[in-house]
């Protein structure tokens, strides 16, 4: 139900803010701001796409993946997408996601939420520095059926 409400009220809010801005600064400037924010959103998405490809290759090469970098990349991509959507409310949300301090705070809040939810378990893709080198030999026991005359444990 909340997603349904978002699809109903978000366009109404965006239209109201658009009309308010057009009344305040003029229709031309309002349209220019909308087009400029969409272009900025396309630029951010393009830039994040290139960074995401490079960032996805680096951890595979070094066997190390940073959750912070992944979260920041996701926030930047979401910000770019929100800037493309015409409207001033979504642009405001996107500008908040572009601020590193706000992304850091969001990362901390989300991280603490998952730490509480999953019992503080930590998952890391980095390999441990402890290596255990061992050899093994498989030993198979020979079992005989009960009542078999060839049983060595059976006394005659």
Image: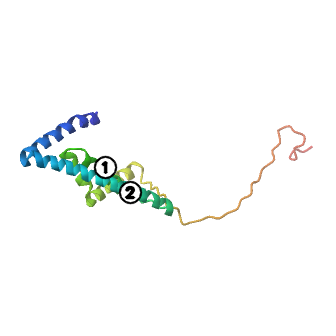
Instruction: Please say if 73 is above or below 82.
Output: below
Q: Nearer the viewer, residue 53 or 70?
A: 53
- Split into 4 quadrants, where in the image is the C terminus? top right
> Residue 103: which quarter of the image?
bottom left
- Seen at 16% across and 39% down, the residue is 15
* In the image: residue 56, left or right of residue 83: right
Number of callouts = 2
Q: Nearer the viewer, residue 135 or 3?
A: 3
- Residue 92 appears in the picture as rendered: no
- For disc 2, the neighbor class at 10 Å (few under 14, some 14 to 19, many from 20) is few
* In the image: residue 22, left or right of residue 138: left
- Seen at 71% across and 59% down, the residue is 136
Q: Nearer the viewer, mark 2 or mark 1?
A: 2
The image position of residue 131, as x and y in percent, is 59, 65
The image position of residue 38, as x and y in percent, is 24, 49
The image position of residue 1, as x and y in percent, is 28, 33
Q: How is the image coloured?
A: rainbow
- Seen at 7% across and 44% down, the residue is 23
| Real-space CA distance between mark 2 and mark 1, rounded to the nearest whole angstrom | 15 Å
Which mark is drawn over residue 78?
1
The image position of residue 138, as x and y in percent, is 74, 54
Judging from the image, what secondary structure is the residue with disc 1 in?
helix
Judging from the image, what secondary structure is the residue with disc 2 in?
helix
Which residue is denoted by mark 2 in the rendering?
50
* In the image: residue 143, left or right of residue 121: right
- Seen at 17% across and 37% down, the residue is 12
Q: Residue furthest right?
A: 156
- For disc 1, the neighbor class at 10 Å (few under 14, some 14 to 19, many from 20) is some
Mark nearer the N terminus (2 vs 1): 2
Q: Nearer the viewer, residue 121 or 67?
A: 67
């Amino acid at each position: 139900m909340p997603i349904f409400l978002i699809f109903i009220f978000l366009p109404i809010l965006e239209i109201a803010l658009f009309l308010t801005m057009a009344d305040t600064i003029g229709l031309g400037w309002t349209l220019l701001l909308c087009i400029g924010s969409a272009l900025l959103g396309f630029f951010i998405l393009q830039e994040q796409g290139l960074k995401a490809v490079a960032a996805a290759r680096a951890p595979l090469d070094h066997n190390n993946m940073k959750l912070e970098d992944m979260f920041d990349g996701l926030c930047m991509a979401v910000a770019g997408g929100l800037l493309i959507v015409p409207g001033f409310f979504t642009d405001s949300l996107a500008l908040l996601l572009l601020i590193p301090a706000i992304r850091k705070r969001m990362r901390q809040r989300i991280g603490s939420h998952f730490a509480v939810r999953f019992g503080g378990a930590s998952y890391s893709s980095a390999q441990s520095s402890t290596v255990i080198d061992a050899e093994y030999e498989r030993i198979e026991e020979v079992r005989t059926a009960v009542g078999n005359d060839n049983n060595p444990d059976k006394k005659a």
